[in-house]
Image (spheres, helix red, strand yellow):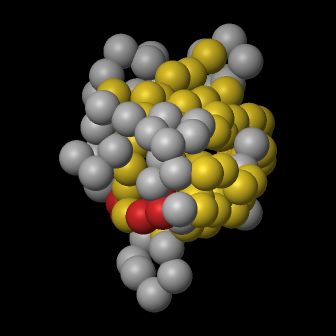
């Protein structure tokens, strides 16, 4: 069992920045892949960033590429999402998720079986 806890959400103005953090605990000595998903009102949950257990491979969705960055601290088992140049379309609940897959980064949603409760990000225009 892996437990995930997100922090850092809140309100930002368009063009501003926020940093989300996710602390992972449990599982077998960590090293599992982590990802950030988001779900906007009336829309499906989408993966926006992911990073492999080793941190050597990462993925960013086209919608956030150039604005967001994902990083992890394997020793602390945390993953951060730095969000810059925010716009109102980034308004959503952001979820941290973990997969037990220990290979290269995966964006297969079904492989992410552990989820945090989510943190709200609201961007005002």
In the image, 47: left or right of 76? left
59 or 115: nearer the viewer:
59
Q: Which residue lies furthest to the bottom in this view?
A: 42
Residue found at x 52% / y 51%:
14
Q: Which residue lies furthest to the left in this view?
A: 62
Residue 43 lies, in percent from the top left, at 41, 81
103 or 80: nearer the viewer:
80
- Image quadrant where residue 82 sits: top right
Residue found at x 44% / y 18%:
55
Q: Can residue 58 be seen in this view?
A: yes
16 or 33: nearer the viewer:
16
117 up-or-down from 101: above or below: below
In the image, 59: left or right of 35? left
Residue 18 lies, in percent from the top left, at 63, 39
Q: Can residue 95 be seen in this view?
A: no
Q: Residue furthest front?
A: 125
55 or 122: nearer the viewer:
122
- Image quadrant where residue 76 sits: top right
19 up-or-down from 117: above or below: above
Residue 5 lies, in percent from the top left, at 76, 47
Residue found at x 51% / y 23%:
71
Residue 67 lies, in percent from the top left, at 38, 35
Residue found at x 62% / y 16%:
73
- Image quadrant where residue 64 sits: top left
Q: How many labels does the image show?
A: 0
In the image, 9: left or right of 110? right
111 up-or-down from 34: above or below: below
């Amino acid at each position: 069992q892996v437990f995930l806890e997100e922090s850092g959400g809140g309100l930002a103005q368009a063009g501003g920045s926020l940093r989300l953090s996710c602390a992972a605990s449990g599982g077998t000595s960590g090293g599992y892949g982590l990802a950030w998903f988001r779900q906007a009102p009336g829309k499906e949950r989408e993966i926006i960033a992911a990073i492999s257990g080793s941190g050597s491979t990462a993925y960013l969705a086209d919608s956030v590429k150039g604005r967001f960055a994902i990083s992890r601290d394997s020793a602390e088992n945390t993953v951060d999402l730095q969000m810059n140049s925010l716009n109102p379309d980034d308004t959503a609940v952001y979820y941290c998720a973990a997969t037990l897959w220990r290979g290269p980064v995966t964006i297969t949603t079904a492989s992410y079986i552990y989820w945090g409760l989510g943190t709200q990000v609201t961007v005002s225009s």
